[in-house]
């Protein structure tokens, strides 16, 4: 039995004050990840600070023509919001490819960003895991690593970030809005999550006293030529083996701008600017798509059970880019199958 205190935050300032006062405290939003981690003994917060009553539930226009999504907007409300559906269908598709309707009805935008890895060893407190207990070792390196990373790994951790929503947010160049004791910050999505390096216990660059207040979407949602392709063991209710968010701007058959982000392959949503630059100015066709996949995966490395992910990722990239180019996103194909 782990005893903990429970309190409610009545404002963002109050939430920051409460978390700063207790280094062992954690915010709880939908609780769909945190409560599991507490039950499994992976984390033992001294206090849970309920943030669900904060005024962070709105989706509003931002001054630059984009949208600002409050941290407490539920995943389902976000995916089905008419502006998201119309202007950011890549984001809607990614969210709807994740978890289950029940979970999406509880899970929040802020919580989704901070969900922890699904590495089995991280959850199994009887096994060494540097992310759970720094310095204890990494059981996945020589263990069952079928779900694990092929890019950006370190000798200390090869876990993947499990979110689908974050892959789309990375591709869209979203920003994470935070508030803390030193004021407010707007963090580029690419700088929010971290690679494991020698501190795999730290997933993000959020400070201990900060709360996520929202996510900002830039004006360009790539609403015409996009696809979110998620490859997983089951068609529903399973985390990605590999996922690809592809977004293109095409004029006369030529790619003017490309965005490519991968999930299930690294400790953070994976973007490769070189592969994107290579696509820009190229024909929207199979061959350049294959070259971009080669570039993106040039440093990929498997650890035995997950070697197959390299070829899977290569094929998924080419397919997702093809779907985006022909304005036939995977989500439409899924609808037709059902
Ligand atoms: C069975 C199952 C299957 C799933 N499948 C998928 C899937 O396929 N794809 C996918 O993307 N996700 C999947 N999920 C994960 C789910 O999307 C996350 O659990 C959810 O998004 C977390 O949101 P939450 O609001 O419940 O977070 P919580 O569990 O409340 O919190 C998670 C973490 O975020 C912190 N936190 C929450 N809000 C804030 C904030 N505003 N500021 C600072 N810190 C905050 C908490 O302290 C905690 O550390 C699955 C979950 C389950 C249980
Ligand atoms: S991959 Fe990371 S999370 Fe998994 S056992 Fe190794 S250190 Fe722990």
Image (cartoon, grey):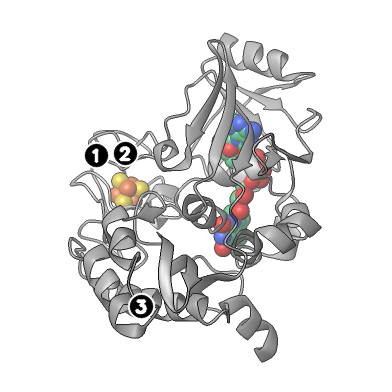
Q: Quadrant of residue 60?
A: top right
Please name the residue that numbered disc 1 is placed on. Answer: 197
Where residue 143 sits: x, y (%)?
25, 61
Q: Where 181 sits versus 53, above or below?
A: above
Expressed as whole percent of the image width and height from the top left, the position of residue 233 reads 48, 77
Asked whether mark 3 and ligand 1 are closer than 8 Å, the reply comes as: no
Q: Is residue 153 left or right of residue 266?
A: left
Residue 7's place in the image compared with 253, above or below, is: above
Give the spatial CA distance, label 2 vs label 3.
40 Å
Q: Position of residue 147 (x, y in %)?
A: 37, 65
Secondary structure category for the residue under label 2: loop
Going by the image, does 128 lie left or right of 179? left
Q: Which residue is mark 3?
A: 283
Query: Which mark sits nearer the N-terminus, 2 or 3?
Result: 2
Residue under the point 61% across and 40% down: 216
The answer to the question of whether label 2 and label 1 lie on touching residues, with beta carbons closer than 8 A, is yes
> Badge 2: how crowded within 10 Å, few (<14), some, or many (20+)?
many
In this rendering, position of residue 123 left or right of residue 57: left
Q: Which residue is mark 2?
A: 200
Mark 2 against mark 3, which lies toward the viewer? Answer: 3
Helix, strand or loop status at disc 3: loop
Between the residue at mark 2 and the residue at mark 1, the CA separation in whole angstroms equals: 6 Å
- Mark 2 CB near ligand 2 (8 Å cut): yes
> Can you tell which quarter of the image residue 217 is in?
top right
Mark 2 vs mark 1, foreground winner is 1
Q: In the orientation shown, which residue stands out farthest toward the front? A: 252
Residue 88 x %, y %: 65, 58
The residue drawn where x is 36% and y is 35% is 201
Question: In what element is the residue under mark 1?
Answer: loop
Nearer the observer, 182 or 107: 182
Q: Residue at x 47, y 77 (%)?
A: 252
């Amino acid at each position: 039995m782990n005893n903990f205190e429970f309190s409610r935050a009545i404002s963002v300032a109050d939430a920051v004050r409460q978390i700063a006062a207790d280094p062992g405290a954690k915010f709880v939003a939908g609780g769909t990840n945190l409560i599991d981690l507490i039950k499994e003994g992976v984390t033992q917060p001294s206090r849970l600070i309920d943030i669900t009553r904060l005024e962070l539930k709105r989706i509003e226009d931002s001054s630059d023509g984009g949208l600002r999504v409050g941290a407490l907007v539920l995943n389902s409300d976000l995916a089905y919001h008419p502006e998201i559906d119309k202007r950011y269908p890549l984001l809607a598709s990614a969210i709807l490819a994740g978890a289950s309707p029940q979970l999406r009805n509880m899970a929040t935008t802020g919580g989704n960003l901070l969900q922890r890895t699904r590495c089995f060893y991280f959850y199994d407190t009887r096994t060494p895991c540097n992310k759970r207990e720094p310095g204890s070792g990494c059981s996945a390196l020589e263990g069952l690593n079928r779900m694990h990373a092929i890019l950006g790994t370190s000798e200390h951790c090869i876990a993947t970030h499990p979110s689908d929503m974050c892959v789309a947010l990375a591709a869209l160049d979203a920003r994470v809005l935070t508030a803390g004791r030193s004021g407010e910050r707007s963090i580029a999505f690419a700088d929010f999550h971290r690679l494991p390096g020698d501190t795999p216990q730290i997933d993000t660059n959020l400070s201990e006293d900060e709360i996520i207040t929202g996510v900002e979407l830039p004006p360009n949602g790539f609403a015409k030529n996009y696809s979110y392709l998620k490859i997983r063991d089951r068609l529903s209710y399973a985390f990605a083996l590999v996922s690809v968010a592809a977004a293109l701007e095409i004029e006369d058959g030529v790619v003017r701008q490309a965005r490519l982000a991968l999930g299930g392959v690294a400790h953070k949503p994976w973007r490769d600017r070189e592969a994107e630059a290579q696509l820009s100015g190229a024909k929207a066709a199979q061959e350049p798509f294959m070259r971009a996949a080669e570039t993106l995966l040039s440093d990929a490395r498997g650890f035995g059970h997950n070697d197959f992910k390299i070829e899977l990722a290569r094929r998924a990239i080419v397919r997702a880019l093809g779907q985006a180019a022909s304005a036939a996103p995977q989500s439409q194909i899924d609808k037709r199958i059902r």
